[in-house]
Every structure is written in structure tokens, then in C-alpha cells.
Image (cartoon, rainbow, N blue to C red):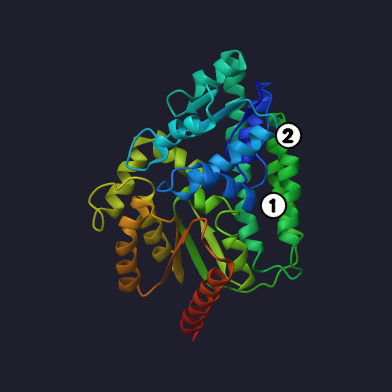
Amino acid sequence: MKFTFPNFGNYNIIFEGILKELNVDVVSPPKITQKTIKIGVEKSPELFCFPLKVNVGDFLLAQEKGAEAFLMWENLGGSCRLRYYGEIQKRILKTKNFFILNSKNLFSLLKKISQKSQKDVIGALGMAFFKTILLEKIEKKKRFYLPREKKRGEAEKVEKELFEELKNINSFSSLLRFFPEVKRRFSQIKIEKSFLPRVMLIGEIYTLVEREVNLNLEKRFAEQKIEVERKLGLLENFKEGLLPFAEKFMQKRVQKYLASTVGGHGRQAIDEFLEAKKKKFEGAVQILPFGCMPETTVRPILENLAKKFKMAFLSLSFDEETGEAGFQTRVEAFSDLLWKKFEKLKK
């Protein structure tokens, strides 16, 4: 069978790589467009959040390309509705070939659908782990160079080239040689050597990493000469899920402001806001799907923290109705506020 999966930012490289490493026939979902969103909205329950609707659009368009089987990640706990997505999508697609992955069945399910040995699956997952480290390193470098580049477009060009090369790496020795190559390629970009206002992007993971959903927010801030940092990614998300002590330490850090988890990435948003304060960022931006309960629950806490620490704060929610013009106006107004705070501190 030909397998597909929903878009998840640049991490598509990792998901596609695992399946190809195991010789599974893959149909990658088309890039998210307005067509993806329109189809997903038409076929999805109205009250479910934006990520589910986009995922449904991904699956339906991949099905048109020949996909016969579908893979979807499941959240095992918490109050985020992600744990229901797989079952709902399975009913919408009307297929029996729908496989729901989670942290407990990942290994066994990959072994089952690939018919490969335990050693092969371990090797594929090991390769994916190191590729993810490199992918997030490339993204971080791009975020630093993007607002500083003298010639617009160079950072994105280098990022694209490196991702294409990363796709084709199939040995651990090649991966190790690729680490210094990332630094070398970005260092060739001519930049304006200046300090810039910094903003921490926090919130729900899907809207944070999928630029087609968040209207390429990182680039918009870069155009305003604002440096952004995003801590939450695939590795950080897995660390919290797989290492129980990491979650306990996080709860200890936010205990003063939130006594227990609210599900999703609500608690993590507070933790990252506190980190932004510690690193002396000028502000933070919360990104969430419209109506996301965990993120909506912690928003008043984040607003109070912003007042307490005298930091700029903006909350941006996304759905199929999010308009380009109004969104850009909010980004520009917030950027002006960040620059005023930055210049005031410099005096």
C-alpha cells in the first residue's frame, strides 16, 4: 500500500525519511494551500480546531495522488483533542487502512507496516533522531540570519538547499559530516552585525511549526528586523512525553502561576514565557488554533505575567477565517512596540 501522513512543517522530511528507510511506498501530502484548507473545512466537524481540518485536507489531497493508507499521531493523555483526531479522520476518509501511532506503539506499528526486522526499525528511528537534531539546528540558524541578512532571501535559500541535502543522507557517517556543513553554509551569508529586539514564539506546536498555517509569522517578524526564537519543536515535545522527570521539573518551574496541567502545551507556554524573561527578551507571542482550550486557558496568565515583567505580549489565533491584511497590521504594530522597548533599554 502507498502510505501518507499529514503535513507538519519541515518535519515532513523526517516522516518521509523513516518510511523510505523502511522501504515503505510513500505519497507525501501536497503543500498546504487554500485548496487544502477549503476541502478540510468542508469535510470536518465545524467545532473541531483548525489543525484537524487542515490534516483532513492533507489526507484527501494525498488520496487523490494515490495514497491508500494513512498514518496519524495520537495524543495518549491530557485534555487536547488531538487524541480524537485519528478516529474522526478515519470516519471522514471511510477507510480501514488508517493507522494511529503513539509513543507506545510506534516501534511495533512501523515493524508491522514495513515487514522489516527489529534492527532495521531501530536503525530507521536512530537516523530520524539525528536528522531531527540537524533539521532543528538549520531552522535555528535561519531564524538568526533571516532578520540580519543584507541580501533578502539568502537565509531561506540556504535553508532550502540544506533540507534537500538532508533528505538524501542515508548513513550516520554522512550525518556527522553534515553538522559542521550547516554552520559553514550559513556563515557565508553577509549580515548586518547588530543587536535586534527578540521575541519568543510560544503556544500550540502545530501552529508554531507549520508556516502555511501561521501565515509565515517568523518571516514577517524578520521583515520588521525582529529576531524570533522558538523552543518548542519535535525533539522538545518528545522529551516531555518520554522523560517523566522533565515534566515534573517544568511543573515545579510554573507552580507559582499554574498549579496543574491544563493539557496541550498550555503549561509549556508559561514555562517558555518565563525563559524569555530570564533571557531578557522584549516580548513573547502566543500562537494557537482558534478555540484551543489549553492555550485559551493560560492566556490570562500570560497577559498578567507580561504586565508584571513589563514585556510586550501578543496572542494570535488561527482558523480558516484569518485574514491577511488584518494579521499583517497586528504584526507591524507589535513590532513597533518591541522596537520602542528595545530602544528605551539601550538609552
Q: How far apart are marks 2 and 1 (CA)?
A: 17 Å
- Would you say residue 253 is visible in this rendering? yes
The residue drawn where x is 48% and y is 27% is: 100
Read off the residue under disc 1: 183
- Would you say residue 33 is visible in this rendering? no
Q: Which amino acid does label 2 sit on?
A: Ile
Horizontally, residue 121 falls left or right of residue 191, namely left
> Which label number is shown at residue 191?
none
Are there few (<14), some (14-19), or many (20+) residues within 10 Å of tag 1?
few
- Find residue 347 and report its horizontal and vertical position in percent: 49, 87
Q: Which amino acid does label 1 sit on?
A: Lys
Depth check: give the residue in front, 85 or 347. 85
Q: Looking at the rendering, which quadrant does residue 278 occupy?
A: bottom left
Depth check: give the residue in front, 68 or 287. 68
Give above or below for 71 relative to 261: above
Q: Looking at the rendering, which quadrant does residue 77 occupy?
A: top left
Horizontally, residue 184 falls left or right of residue 296, namely right
Closer to the observer: label 2 or label 1?
A: 2
Read off the residue under disc 2: 169
The residue drawn where x is 48% and y is 48% is: 205
Give above or below for 169 relative to 186: above
Horizontally, residue 176 falls left or right of residue 40, namely right
The residue drawn where x is 68% and y is 34% is: 64
Depth check: give the residue in front, 237 or 101. 101
Kind of element beneath mark 2: loop
- Find residue 58 and report its horizontal and vertical position in percent: 60, 41
- Find residue 210 and report its horizontal and vertical position in percent: 57, 50
Are there few (<14), some (14-19), or many (20+) residues within 10 Å of tag 2?
some
Q: Looking at the rendering, which quadrant does residue 221 occupy?
A: bottom right
The single residue placed furthest to the bottom in the displayed view is: 347
